[in-house]
């Protein structure tokens, strides 16, 4: 079985011509590098910025949740944040659901 498999691979390599395997490896490496540069690396950068934003939250920050709820940070616990979304209306949300900071932006 092993002998027939190696002869099959040798025959396949002979049909491709010399250096066909090396060209294929270079092509795969190039595809991986391009994917990393345009897909993986930017996603890692966005995730790092989002984690820094969540770690730097403080009272009075105006934020929006992933669900689109705008509010002002009233209290911060380990993984939970108390938001005031209207006068005397407060909700507790998970810190991971906060996606944007609107403290400096004008709200309408």
Image (cartoon, helix red, strand yellow):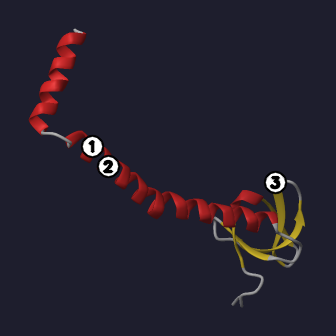
**Residue 26 bears which disc, if any?**
2
Between marks 3 and 1 in the image, the one whose residue lies nearer the viewer: 1
The answer to whether 92 appears left or right of 34 in the picture is right
Is disc 3 in contact with disc 1, using a CB cutoff of under 8 Å? no
Give the labeled residue for mark 1: 22
Location of the C terminus (image quadrant): bottom right
| Residue appearing at x 35%, y 54% in the figure | 31
* Residue 104 to residue 84: above or below: below
| Crowd tier of the residue under label 2, counting other residues whose Cα lies within 10 Å: few below 14, some 14–19, many 20 or above | few
Give x and y (percent) for residue 11: 12, 26
Give x and y (percent) for residue 66: 64, 65
| Residue appearing at x 82%, y 69% in the figure | 57
**Residue 79 bears which disc, if any?**
3
Q: Determine which quarter of the picture holds residue 56.
A: bottom right
**Who comes first in sequence, dot 3 or dot 1?**
1
Element type at mark 3: loop
- 43 or 33, which is in the foreground? 33
């Amino acid at each position: 079985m092993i002998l027939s498999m190696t002869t099959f691979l040798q025959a396949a390599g002979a049909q491709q011509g010399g250096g066909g395997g090396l060209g294929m490896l270079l092509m795969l490496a190039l595809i991986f590098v391009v994917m990393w540069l345009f897909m993986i690396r930017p996603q890692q950068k966005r995730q790092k910025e989002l984690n820094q934003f969540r770690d730097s939250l403080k009272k009075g920050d105006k934020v929006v949740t992933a669900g689109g709820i705008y509010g002002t940070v009233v209290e911060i616990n380990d993984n939970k944040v108390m938001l005031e979304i209207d006068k005397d209306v407060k909700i507790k949300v998970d810190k991971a659901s906060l996606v944007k900071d609107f403290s400096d932006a004008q709200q309408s």
